[in-house]
Image (cartoon, grey):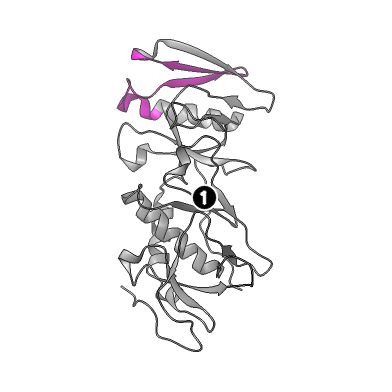
Amino acid sequence: MTALTTTPDSSAGIDLAVGEYWIEYVPAARADECRVSFPAVIEPARLHGLWVRPRLRREVAEAVCEWLNVVYPIGPDWYPLARVEDDVLVVFTGEAAHQRHEIALGADGRYPLGELGRWFLSGPTRTRARFYRQLEVLRDAARHYPRPGETVVTCDPDNLPVSGFPARIDTSPGQQRVLVFRPEIAEAVAVWCATNHDTFPSDHPLVYFDRDTLVHVHQHRRTHDGYLPWRIDPDADGNYRIGAQEWVFQAVSEKSEGDVRPAVTPS
């Protein structure tokens, strides 16, 4: 078993807590430095059938206020302004931010944003460290080597061979086929999906790690009422078992019975 080497995913110095997912505000500009993700609990109902209704911890709400102070000048008719007054989150919306909305802490100790803002399920903030870590993973040809008993599979057949990754296929009688990825391979699959999602968000899922849990955000279902990302915890051996629920893989090689050549060569 190989331990994960993922870079900790945090935004504004805040990590995900139990039951939280990354959310992001629909940006007025595509510049990555203006796009920051925040952790939040997601209410089941969507806003206008598309945007999520987040509930924010106090420390997250304060971080959102600080971020809005930075990005507001970029799009003053798009971004709201906000501040925390005592225990009340005050949000200013509309032209010249003249409409005042007061949000009290809910029974769960969080601020329910409700109808305010166009927030969507996203992933960790696109930091420089995260970018270089993704680049390092994508350039690691060893993550394409199948070991004995593994088969090269892909969830992106149009981009073979670089989208092929080794997995053990568990075909227990009476059970659906399950792919078993070593942790370093699961990390590579996550990076592959996340980087392609950034470019083609309608064609690829968004995948990231919450500590050692693999989180899969479906590119279309994330707008549905009640939807929450699929969480895949490691098994007793530290591997990741992926069934055919929301993530479809297909085999592109025969099962390896011994040493084989890598599916790709280093760039």
- Say which residue label 1 marks: 9
Q: Which residues are magenta?
A: 70-95
Looking at the image, residue 89 sits to the left or right of residue 204; the answer is: right
- Closer to the camera in the image, 255 or 61: 255
Give percent across and percent down for residue 17.
62, 42
- Quarter that holds the C terminus: bottom left
- Residue in view at x 37 percent, y 67 percent: 163
- Residue in view at x 47 percent, y 21 percent: 82
Q: Residues within 10 Å of mark 1 (few under 14, many from 20)?
A: many
- Against 247, is 76 above or below? above
The image quarter containing residue 145 is bottom left
- Quarter that holds the N terminus: bottom right
The image quarter containing residue 25 is top left
- Against 149, is 34 above or below? above
Give percent across and percent down for residue 153.
44, 71
The answer to whether residue 17 is magenta is: no
- Residue in view at x 47 percent, y 88 percent: 259
- Closer to the camera in the image, 150 or 101: 150
- Against 105, is 184 above or below? below
**Amino acid bearing label 1:** Asp
State the SS at label 1: loop
Give percent across and percent down for residue 220.
42, 44
- Residue in view at x 39 percent, y 59 percent: 132
Give percent across and percent down for residue 146.
47, 79
